[in-house]
Image (cartoon, rainbow, N blue to C red):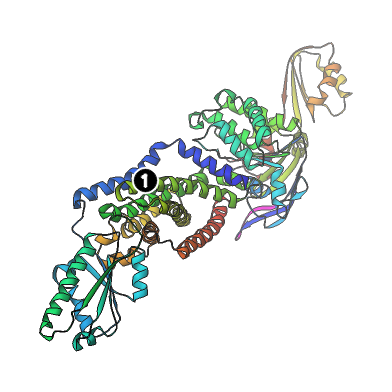
Amino acid sequence: MIEVEQLRKQYGDFTAVHDVSFTARAGEIFGLLGPNGAGKTTTIGCISTLLAPTSGRIRVMGHDVVKEGIEARRSMGVVPQEIALYDDLSAEENLSYWGGAQGLRGAPLRERIREVLDLTGLLDRSREPIKRFSGGMKRRLNFACGIVHQPKVLLLDEPTVGVDPQSRVRLLELVREQARAGACVLYTTHYMEEAESLCDRLAIVDHGRICAQGTLAELRALLGERDVLRLSGAFHPEQVRQTLARVEGVEVIHADEALLALAMTDASHRLPLIFAALNGSELRGTTLTQPSLESLFIKLTGTELRE
Amino acid sequence: MRFVWISALKDLRRLRREPVTILTWLAIPTFVAVILTLVFGPRGTGPHGKLLIADEDHAVGATMLTQAFSQGALGKMLALEQVSQAEGRRRLDRGDASALIVIPSGFSMSFMTGQPVTIDLIRNPAQRVLPDIIEESLGIMLDRAAALRSGTGQPAIQLQANVLPNKMERPGGFAAILLPGALFMAIFFIAGALAADVWRERTSGALRRVATTPARFGAFLAGKLLASALIFSLIGAFGLAVAHGLMQLRIASFPAALLWIALSGCGLYLLIMLVQSAASSERVASLLTNFVTLPLVMLGGGFVPFEWMPRSFARIGEWTPNGWCVVELRAVLAGSLEPWAFAVILAAVAAAWLASVRTIRRAAC
């Protein structure tokens, strides 16, 4: 569990992080979404004890990162933005070194190295110097070095930057597996679609401040816009209007013989009700349009998400 | 403590993957030594050494005798230095001169009044040619002085020539002059290359990653130091083996010499690391290293031994960090173990280690 309270980080007159507060729980993926320079890496730097906060409090698994840095670091795994590995060592040797740095040794370390190599699909190349690896393989090993000691808290700082789509999918699946195994995952990214597909909860960050936080549905609700469900098929418009008027929270914004357009909040959860109400109509196609994080970001910050 | 070993092992593994680098480090001083031999011949431009004079008389006779050594061919061959007898013996003990002449108190008066008097000449056993020349020349000078007094029937001036006990069993000649400097040139270059590795770790993000683990930077750096010490010892053992072949050095002095090479290598490594920490990028760090290393190697007896340098340069060179290491290595090889020198280098390594830990931590974050 990560608890951040009123975190502030200043460099002289410049404030990189303004009174940021959030809590990330075990088994969930908490995302920090924002453009480059928003303060995501500074926040992760303070949590990982690389940077000393100017004020505020951070606890990792109950340990204050300033007063009990070593204890906090013991429960932490960090996957940095850069590929922080030794190119002239093999995957196995890199894992052995970083596992050793986390205090693992002997048979448990060897066993764990084998497990993470298998998990990341690098087992068959484990003895090769990693300078021969592709970018995607290095990214996976970078991730493996962060989880070799089975951390309870995993900090991932834009781990998919510059990764090909195939490796990205694989990496994201590895992240999900860590959360499923009970780890508390803090994930920073500036990719909207990554945040939407991966994170259980999100904080939108810009200029060092959290603009909004919550689940995806909560953030979309903040937008005040509803999902739009478009149904194609063969309909009796008047009959459909009367039927759907009985379903709470659903507004028919367009109805003709071939197309229905309905507006509602949390459409994905209401679909069974709507399909039940339309029983008897011929349905050929369904399209659900949700308010995007992109539009939410623009609404909250007044600007587009800059790369 | 375990992370010290893990860290050292990591660096040794990485170095093992680059044998060409290690061979290059060894090749540079060897190449320079070969070039110097070819250019200057195995004896260089001719014998050139230092004569220490302990003048306890401070009168005209002693001055005349001293001046005789600074005239003509002898003057070109010998750099004279006035020292106290104790200092002269200590310096000679460390192999820092070809010979020591002790002119006793009352020498001039005894000479004038025809009293018997003895001049002590103490030879450096590690050298042959120059002490021979000095003894021969001093003998001739004293014979001439005696001839001036031959009509008086009074006894001649006695010359008592002693060879300093122990020390190097055989003269080292060219190799003895060149080897310590060449060895430390290699150590300095290796130290520079090893210290540059910290910059690579900083650039790759490995240093930041270390900072997020429970391991301490002190242990991380101690591991790097341990790996470096092993490399320096290896290079030192190679150099000493060559020295043994060429100079018949006493094996008994090897452990102390190896310890000295490893410790001073660590000191130079940390020194370069601190210099590099002032740089804003890896490229600037490399330029800064060359800017500092090359003049120090030149002055510190790496390319040209102190004996071949103008005296003023040699004096400066002997007090550069690497030059001092060369001077002390010669002393260690001469069998003159200086506990204070070991204490100084240990204290310097400890202080530089503390400063480097702070610097690296700052660089990582």
User: Does residue B48 appear in this view?
Assistant: no
| Residue name at image x 66 percent, y 42 percent | A102
Relative to A262, B86 lies left or right: left
Residue ID for mark 1: B241
Mark 1: give few (<14), some (14-19) or many (20+) Cα within 10 Å: some
Q: Where's the C terminus of chain A, which quadrant?
A: top right
The amino acid at mark 1 is Ala
Relative to A177, B348 lies left or right: left
Residue B220, position in %: x, y? 57, 48
Q: Nearer the viewer, residue B297 or A214?
A: B297
| Residue name at image x 69 percent, y 46 percent | A73
Residue A122, position in %: x, y? 58, 26
Q: Nearer the viewer, residue A108 or B285?
A: A108
Q: Where's the N terminus of chain A, which quadrant?
A: top right
Q: Nearer the viewer, residue A115 or B212?
A: A115
Which quadrant of the figure has residue A214? top right
Q: Secondary structure at mark 1?
A: helix
Residue B272, position in %: x, y? 44, 55
**Magenta stretch contains residue B265:** no
Q: Nearer the viewer, residue A54 or A147?
A: A147
Magenta stretch? Answer: A12-18
